[in-house]
Image (tube, coloured by chain):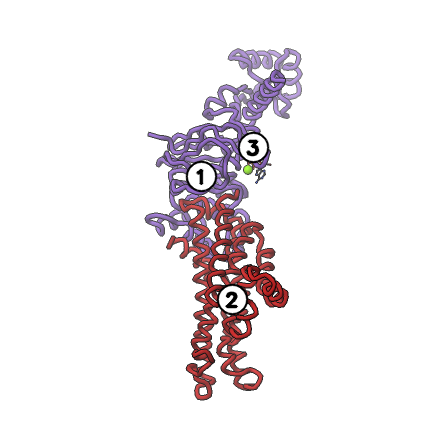
Amino acid sequence: MYTLVKQESFKLTKKVSTWISTGFLVGVEILFAFLSRIYPQTFVPANMFESLYFARPIIIFYMIAAAATIITMEFQYGTMKQVLYRRYSRGQILVSKWLAIFLYTLYWYVISTGVALLLKAMLFHHTLSIHQGAGDGMSIFTRGLAISAASFVSLWLLLSVVFLLANLFRNSAAAVSVGIIGYFAAYIVTQLLTILIQKWDWAKWNPVTMTLYPSMLARPGYYQPLLNMQGWQMLLGNLIYIALFLGIGYYVFNRRNV
Amino acid sequence: MSSILSVQNLNKSFGNKHVLHDVSFDLKKGHIVGLIGPNGAGKSTLMKTMLGLFNYDSGSVKIAGETVTPQKHESLSKVGALIEYPGIYPFLTGWDHLQLFADGDHQLIHIQKIISQLNMDSYIKRKAKGYSLGMKQKLGIALALVNFPDLVILDEPMNGLDPQATKDLRDLIISESQKGTTFLISSHILSELQRLAQDLLIIDEGSIVQQTTMHELLASQGKQTIMLMTSDDKKARELLKKAKFQTTPDPRVEVVAKDDETMPEVLRLLIEGGVDVLDVTRLEGNLESSLLEVLKQSRIKKRLAEEQAE
Ligand SMILES: Nc1ncnc2c1ncn2[C@@H]1O[C@H](COP(=O)(O)OP(=O)(O)OP(=O)(O)O)[C@@H](O)[C@H]1O
Ligand SMILES: [Mg+2]
């Protein structure tokens, strides 16, 4: 398994797009840090830091694309056969791809958090402290980490769907579009969702609600009564749906003709 | 000792389209086996099923005694393959590919060995997106062979190779088979296969029509032909026609030999008729005509059997 994950990571590091997108992400963080320094009224330094200088949505789009292509690339280049007719089982191949994407997600969060800390130290050394309170007994630093963790979890909910679709359609366009729609879906239908949830309590357990987990952590007072859910319920729901979608994808992958 | 590859009563369908019918055969260790048959006969499907790429309806595939299924196939560590066309990552170099698929001990030595055997040094460090058709094909073959496996399965390996590369590949296959590697090779380039394969599996419409050796097939179908070079081909042809010898439509003068008597009779006839014979060659039966004959016969038999069944 270690070998397989290493091979998947090797392919990722050899793609030019990996390095271009890393450069782009760092560029965006730098841009927003400077904006926040120059226009602190519009781009409030504490909030900007908490949002990792706008890195999170970019990471989500990157990861949706990466999860789709790590599967569909093999079909597109005709390499899936070669990858499969080795001693490794189908399950091992798929799990190694999940793990590689998991590590890749970590890579992005570590990079973006590191860059955010660096920018804070360079541009807001005296004006902003990461230990500054952010309500609920959290500092902006711990709050930032908590939101990152939550967005990591709900990102994986999206990715588990993307993996499944990439597997079914062998086509990254379909998988990526559904992933991105999924990302916006929750914001678009929040109103409808809250109406439904007020009417039938069980409706809150649908997967779209789960993607609001990071928003709920960012504004607990606003979302909790609206969705009628606690943080731990959201976490649990996310984990169950992730397991479910990955499980279906695993089943499909094991049974398909290549 | 169990054979390196054993297929028993294999059946495979796509939906309600039955593609492989009760396919059974064994491969002998160290042999080069040709898998031949018309387009759509099921050659690639058979190979993919053996490699665990397809689910199958019934029967079994065993490599070195271990069953292969799409879900589990550890015994494929003993196998290298190239099916249909090579899968190439455009963003990796040839070397990266070999590194990615090298397995087991002595990886670096194996990589260097296969590169020099297939003469790929000049471009192996370049990104594969710039490779020509033949370069990609060679890389695909190198990937199949890089682990120096016990069994090598090649589907149309000579596709797009130049004469030098074809010869390099032939030499490599023969030398590896002498060391004990078994090869299963499908190809439509029969002249090439005739120089390589010892055993033959003939497949048509998803069934094995005949499992034989190259020698036996050529001998059994060996309608020997006598080719003549004469001082006057036109006159020679007229004489032969009058004497009711069977000739071929070939522009050269060719006579089909019915038995050992044909050659002396033909020579006597021509010399007595005043035509000088400059050269005489006996043509061996070739794989192409033998294959076509076997396929024709088997289809006739199959139709008859179907008619009787009705
Ligand atoms: N994925 C698939 N789905 C449905 N039918 C298929 C599939 N792959 C192959 N077939 C059918 O199976 C039959 C055998 O195809 P196969 O590719 O094995 O032929 P082949 O002997 O390799 O032919 P060729 O010499 O042209 O390569 C054909 O009738 C083909 O239409
Ligand atoms: Mg084929």
Nearest to the eye among marks 2 and 3: give it. Answer: 2
Q: Which residue is mark 3?
A: B19
The amino acid sitting under disc 1 is Thr
Q: Label 3, label 1: how many angstroms apart (C-alpha)? A: 18 Å
In the rendered image, residue A246, in percent from the top left (x then y), is placed at: 49, 53
Above or below for A254 versus A232? above
Instruction: Characterize the local packing of mark 2: few (<14), some (14-19) or many (20 or more) Cα atoms within 10 angstroms.
Output: some
The amino acid sitting under disc 2 is Met
Chain of the residue where label 1 is placed in the rendered structure: B
Which chain is drawn using red?
A
Q: Is residue A121 visible?
A: no
Q: Which mark is residue B69?
A: 1
Ligand 1 within 8 Å of disc 2? The answer is no
Instruction: Characterize the local packing of mark 3: few (<14), some (14-19) or many (20 or more) Cα atoms within 10 angstroms.
Output: some
Which chain is drawn using purple?
B
Above or below for B52 versus B22? below
> Which residue lies at the image location 55% right of the left edge and 74% below the top edge?
A222
Ligand 1 within 8 Å of disc 3? The answer is yes
What secondary structure is marked by label 2? loop
Residue B227 is drawn in which quadrant? top right
In primary-sequence order, the first of circles 3 and 1 is 3
Q: Is residue A27 or residue B69 the one in the foreground?
A: B69
Task: Confirm whether circles 2 and 3 share one chain.
Answer: no
Task: Confirm whether circles 3 and 1 share one chain.
Answer: yes
Q: Is residue A124 or residue A184 the one in the foreground?
A: A184
In the rendered image, residue B187, in percent from the top left (x then y), is placed at: 52, 35
The amino acid sitting under disc 3 is Val
Q: Which mark is residue B132?
A: none
